[in-house]
Image: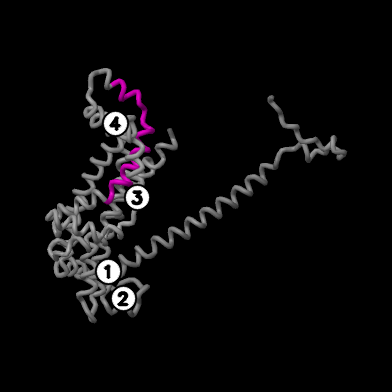
Amino acid sequence: MKTTETPAPLPAESGAPITKTDLQPPSPAKEKKEGTVLNVFSHGVLVIWAFMVVLPLLWAVMTSFKDDRSIFSSPWSLPDSLHFDNWSRAWTQANMSDYFLNTVLVVGGSLIGTLVLGSMAAYVLARFDFPGNRFIYFLFIGGMSFPIMLALVPLFYVVNNMGLLNTIHGLILVYIAYSLPFTVFFLTAFFRTLPTSIAEAAFVDGASHSRTFFQIMLPMAKPGLISVGIFNFLGQWNQYMLPTVLNTDPDKRVLTQGLVQLAVSQGYKGDWSGLFAGLVMAMLPVLAAYIIFQRQVVQGLTAGALK
C-alpha cells in the first residue's frame, strides 16, 4: 500500500496568523552575503596553502645561488650575487650529471612499461567478462595496500637470483611491478567510462581486438594515461627506498641516492650551496612536468564524473 507523507501544517492551521514574512522567499542579499563569506574563507585557505607550498620552493631556489657563508648568516635575504658555480660544482664534481642520466633512463623505461602493460590489463578487466575477472582486479587493488617495506628482503633475493641486482633494467622491472597496481586500478575505472559504441563499430568493420585497442581505445584514453603517468612519474622520480636496497653500485646511482651521497660525503665541512643546487636540479623536472600537463591531469581525474 502506497502511503504519502502528511504535509506540515501551515501557520494558520497551528493557530498562528499568516504574515508576509512567512510567504516571502529568502532575501537574495542574505544569500549573496553568505556566499561571499564562504568564498572569502575558501580563498583564504587556498592562499595560505599556496604560501606554505611555494615558499619552501622559492627559498630552496634562492639558497642554491648563495655561498655557504650567506646561507647561515642571512638565510632569508636575497643573494648578493648569483653563484652559478654552485650548479656547475654539483653537476660535475658531485656527479649529479651521471645520477641525472641514470634517473632518466630508469624512470623513462619504467614509465613506458607501466603505461603499456597497465593500460592493456586495465582494458581487458574493464571491457571483457571472464571467470576470475573480479578476482584479478582485487588482486591489483590488494597490491596497492601491501607495504613495500615488507617485500624488500625477499625482493632483494629474487632480483639477486635473477642476476638483475645493480642493473638499470633490473630497477626498471621493479619500478614497473611497484607502479602497476595503482595504474591498473586507475585506468580500469577510466576505460569503463569510454563509450562502447565506437569499439563495437570497429569490430563490425573487421578490426581485431589489438587494433581496436591501440588505434581507437588507447587514443581516447589519453587524458587518463597522462594523469596516471604524472602520478607514476612523481613516485618513481622521488623513489629512494627501492634503489637504495637494489642498487648499491656507485656508477648506477639515481638522483635520490646522489643527493644523500652529496650530503654525507662532505663530512664536517658541508657543501650546503652545492647540496641546494643539486636539490633544485632534482626538483625542476618534476615541477616542469606538472606545470606542462596540469590541465590534462585535471581532465583525467574528472573524466568519469563529467560523463
Which residue type carries mark 4?
Met
Identify which residue, 302 or 77, lies in the foreground. 302
Which residue type carries mark 2?
Ile
Can you identify the residue that label 1 sits on? 276
The boundaries of the magenta stretch are 178-201
Can you identify the residue that label 3 sits on? 144
CA neighbours of label 3 inside 10 A, class few (<14), some (14 to 19), many (20+):
some
Can you identify the residue that label 2 sits on? 71
Say whether disc 4 or disc 1 marks the residue closer to the N-terminus: 4
Can you identify the residue that label 4 sits on? 217
Say whether disc 1 or disc 2 marks the residue closer to the N-terminus: 2
> Where 12 falls versus 62 (above or below)?
above
Say whether disc 2 or disc 4 marks the residue closer to the N-terminus: 2
> What is the x, y in percent for residue 145?
36, 52
Residue 168 placement, left or right of 117 = left
Q: Are marks 1 and 2 in contact (CB under 8 Å)?
A: yes
Which residue type carries mark 1?
Phe
Q: CA distance from mark 2 to mark 3?
A: 41 Å
Which residue type carries mark 3?
Met
Which element type, helix, strand or loop, lies under badge 4? helix
